[in-house]
Amino acid sequence: MSSASSMNSLTVATAAIFGSLGLLWLYKKLRSQQRRAGLKDKVVLITGASSGVGEACARAFYCLGCKVILCARRAPELERVKKELMALKLAPGIPAHTPHVIPLDLERLDELPDKAKEALALHGHVDILINNGGMSGRGSVAETVLSVHQKIMNVNHFGSLVLTSAILPNMISRRSGHILAVSSIQGRIAIPFRSAYSASKHAMQAFFDSLRAEVAEHNIHVTVLSPSYIKTNISLSALDGDGSVHAKMDSTTAGGMSTVYVADKVVDAVAKRQSDVVLGPFTHGAAIYIRALVPNLYFWIMAGRARKGTKTED
Ligand SMILES: *[C@@H]1O[C@H](CO)[C@@H](O)[C@H](O)[C@H]1NC(C)=O
């Protein structure tokens, strides 16, 4: 072979590789758009919809033409979100379904089945359940009272569990549905001074992993989304060990991902039926692998972190 013709075949090969990568990229983009478009008219129930990630999810699903059901404790805030959604100008061909508001408190577990019934009665079913509502905690185990552990476990874990269990029979009978849990990287690794929060998120991860396997045969999909820090008000309403409200904006929270970005990944996860999504900087994702593969290294890093006493700052 002459050097000219080998140059030629090299050029052809390179063009073929980049051409196929380009086509693959285009195909994926179109496929993703098509899947998102497929969410039109779906009934989406979102907890924690009065602010933060929940509010951003409400907006994202509403803009795709979904029938959103907004749930959280604060009714006036839900009404504000509803009003803001209805003021949005939607893309051509996207129906503007009037959002519904159902105030609920995830801590009041005995009231949740009735709330689920109320939600199911609106459209006869719920297609997508976004278990997003939750709260955080700050403080060492030594100074955290039991009621704080219980409250955080109730809101994050049992709240999502009860609501999910109440919606599930309807999904099973329709052989259709998607349940997403907004967990946390702390559902995969525990960090010091977050024992209650980490434990509640680990519980969620286990519960939804177990559920995913059980409902696969009913054509129901389960996603656990584990984001790192998100720029929300979560640290403001977090509980300190003694049960008082933390009421501070932590620097890690303030420097976190935007709620719009996370909501986009929530929509993606539903559209692509992803089972498990970890979101955040590389080092946070890597920590999950370090914990799994070299646990003693992870424990050493965390002990160092605890010694520095970063109780409130991340
Ligand atoms: C945090 O709370 C403030 C004041 O209520 C509100 O304006 C802001 O939108 C909230 N942030 C998020 C991300 O929800």
Image: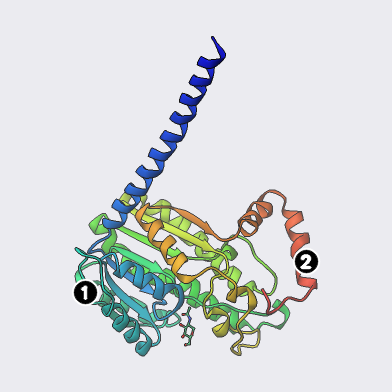
Where residue 243 sits: x, y (%)?
61, 88
**Residue located 31% across and 57% down the image:** 36
What residue is rendered at 57% in x and 69% in y? Answer: 229
Label 1: few (<14), some (14–19) or many (≥20) C-alpha neighbours in 10 Å: few
Q: Is the distance from the Cβ of mark 2 to the nearest ligand 1 atom less than 8 Å?
A: no
Front one among 75 and 40: 40
Q: In this rendered view, identify the residue nearer to me: 153 or 269.
A: 269
Question: Sequence-wise, which precedes: disc 1 or disc 2?
Answer: 1
Q: To which residue does mark 1 refer?
A: 121
Identify the residue at image location x=29%, y=72%. Answer: 68
The answer to whether residue 240 is left or right of residue 48 is right
Element at badge 2? helix
Kind of residue sitting beneath label 1 = Ala
**Disc 2: which residue:** 303
- Scheme by which the image is coloured: rainbow
Separation (CA) of disc 1 from disc 2:
50 Å
Instruction: Judge from the rendering whether residue 134 lies leftward or rightward of residue 188; answer left or right.
Output: left
Of the 4 image quadrants, the one containing the C terminus is: bottom right
- Looking at the image, residue 249 lies above or below residue 191: below
Helix, strand or loop status at disc 1: helix
Q: Does 248 sit above or below residue 63?
A: below
* Numbered badge on residue 249: none
The amino acid type found where label 2 is placed reads: Ala
Say which quarter of the image contains residue 103: bottom left
Reply above or below: 189 against 85. above
Q: Nearer the viewer, residue 207 or 122?
A: 122
